[in-house]
Amino acid sequence: MRAPIETRFPRPSVMGVVNVTPDSFSDGGVNFDPSDAVAAARRMLAEGAAIVDVGGESTRPGADGVGADEELRRVVPVLEALAGDVPVSIDTSKARVASRALELGAELVNDVTALRGDGALAEVVAESGAYVCLMHMQGEPRTMQAEPRYDDVVSEVRSFLEERVRFAVDAGIAEERICLDPGIGFGKTVEHNFELVRRLGELTAVGRPVVVGFSRKSSLGRLLGDPSATTGSVAASVGAAVAAYQRGATILRAHDVREHVEALTAARAVLA
Ligand code: HH2
């Protein structure tokens, strides 16, 4: 039986990002070779990551999806090599990929569709007893940045996440294994993204730990003056992560693990 997610991941915990893809928005191709991905995951663990999030499909704005066979081809060699050594989260929306990853020891399923993408995924998570991250996204990756619109982004994201928690619990997933994510950059303008973190207390009030993934996202580059930026700097990422932690985030999803762990350790010492 797994511990409640808040026991397993004390605030703040860093989730390191390992994209086994040729086309991710900030590190596409860097870890496409399985041996590079494995080395990156081990390095992130040594640098203080609580878990590494292994993904075989880019969800960047404009991305076309890949099929389950290709996603499995990408991630399985990495998961096999890490099994037993490195705590793993699988970044997938597909039941087949999640199922294989869980067999290979993954403990968390990170689904950017919040169990809306594949009707079989909720049951896979429920039966395995894995942790799950339910993320908000408006639209789908191919078109989501076209014209994101909300009356009130925070209350709409909050209602959505509350509804997805009810769905997951009804599907047999224990509430204490669920964490939530506002989905920075997934159908949001720069201002939507910052408002979600500014008012993060309205999301932590749902009662589940919150994950924030601002790392390298284009809103940070745009904030700093490049209107066509597709990425943001490490320093801006760390600043956003520390602010998100201060506003109540539990897990910070980050590509640059050492920098995030050092900054969050200092922030915690000051704020605790
Ligand atoms: N962001 C990305 C992918 N998965 N999962 C959660 N829970 N939260 C996020 O903010 C999030 C996520 C996008 O970042 P990345 O994995 O670096 O890029 P890509 O989707 O292009 O592989």
Image (cartoon, grey):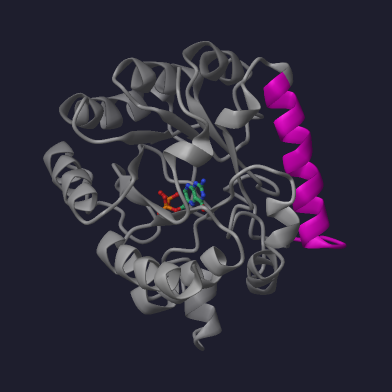
Q: Is residue 196 left or right of residue 244?
A: right
Q: Where is 116 relative to 224, above or below?
A: above
Q: Where is 51 relative to 121, above or below?
A: below
Q: Nearer the viewer, residue 229 or 154?
A: 154
Tell me where residue 201 appears, x and y as whole percent.
71, 61
Give the extent of the magenta segment: 148-169
Tell me where residue 71 appears, x and y as whole percent.
36, 29
Q: Where is 182 relative to 192, above or below?
A: above
Q: Nearer the viewer, residue 270 or 240?
A: 270
| 70 in magenta | no
From the image, give the main secondary structure of the stretch colored magenta.
Answer: helix
Tell me where residue 140 appears, x and y as whole percent.
63, 44
Q: Residue furthest top?
A: 127
Residue at 50% x, 18% y: name it.
129
Q: Is residue 65 left or right of residue 103?
A: right
Residue at 30% x, 58% y: name it.
27
